[in-house]
Image (cartoon, rainbow, N blue to C red):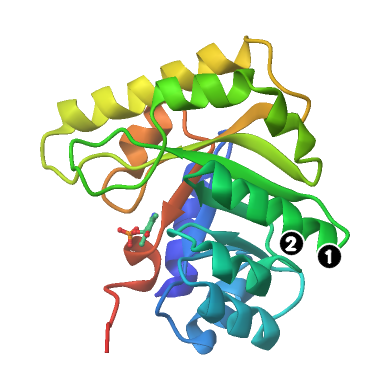
Amino acid sequence: MIKNNIKQFKDFLKDTNTRLIAVSKTQPVALIQEAYDAGQRIFGENKAQEMTSKHEALPKDIEWHMIGHLQSNKVKYIAPFVSLIHSVDSYKLLEEINKQAIKNNRTISCLLQVHIAREETKFGFDETEITSLFSEKKLSTLKNIHILGLMGMATFTEDERIIHAEFQSLKKLFDKLGVSDLPENVSMRELSMGMSSDYKIAIEEGSTLIRVGTAIFGERNYH
Ligand SMILES: *Cc1c(COP(=O)(O)O)cnc(C)c1O
């Protein structure tokens, strides 16, 4: 089943600029290996320690993406190997990622999470905060991070008009920032939006990275 799902996503994304992140949080190593054997190489996790132990157990050519809220004191676990952190939601977290990147003698790629949904609880920056962050000199002193773009989550709703509108607003911000004068360590290349329930809408609205769990692995089993 997983093999087929991966194959279907591959076919679906062929001839697009969108890549698939297989969200493997809570899934056992054996199922991730199954997706790997079907050719999938990018996996997304939302907990630092879980990602670290899966990284140790699985093939080393996997790209691990952090997609969940990340506490500063957990950055050290994933800093040696993480490929992209989608969920950066504060300057303080950027500073810690930079510090741990220096310790590991590497550059860590990040996306800034933008708050686009109606729900109050979602983490993230708003447009004003990002604009002022990019105009401040202090951001370019974080030489071991590279901000590659934005990430957002739409409201969980059946109303597709709301989802379209929220993804459109994120794409608009992404394009606007892309033509502005950006700090040296910032470029607007990746737009991470879309999950199992709304990835088709997200692709229509310009997503370059979709984060899909349930539609690949089935329902998650939280013990
Ligand atoms: C769990 C999760 C996903 C995947 O959700 P599905 O509905 O299973 O596709 C995507 N993005 C984030 C941030 C998540 O936490």
Identify the residue under disc 1. Answer: 104
Three-letter amino acid code at the position of disc 2: Gln
Three-letter amino acid code at the position of disc 1: Asn
Q: Residues within 10 Å of mark 2 (few under 14, many from 20)?
A: many
Task: State which quarter of the image contains the C terminus.
Answer: bottom left
Closer to the camera, 7 or 194? 194
User: Contact (CB < 8 A) between labels 1 and 2?
Assistant: yes
Classify mark 2: helix, strand or loop.
helix
Q: Quadrant of residue 15?
A: top right
Closer to the camera, 122 or 167? 122
Q: Quadrant of residue 74?
A: bottom right
Is 52 situated left or right of 131 in this image?
right
**What residue is at 83 percent from the left and 57 percent from the top?**
102
Identify the residue under disc 2. Answer: 100
Q: Where is residue 54 drawn, in percent x and y?
A: 59, 82
Question: Is residue 133 in view?
Answer: yes
Classify mark 1: helix, strand or loop.
loop
Q: Residues within 10 Å of mark 1 (few under 14, many from 20)?
A: some
Task: Ligand 1: give its quadrant.
Answer: bottom left
Residues at marks 1 and 2, CA–CA distance in whole angstroms: 6 Å
Is 162 situated left or right of 190 in this image?
left
Q: Is residue 197 above or below residue 151?
A: below
Is 194 situated left or right of 206 in this image?
left
Q: Give the total number of marks visible in the rendering.
A: 2
Q: Where is residue 76 drawn, in percent x and y?
A: 67, 70
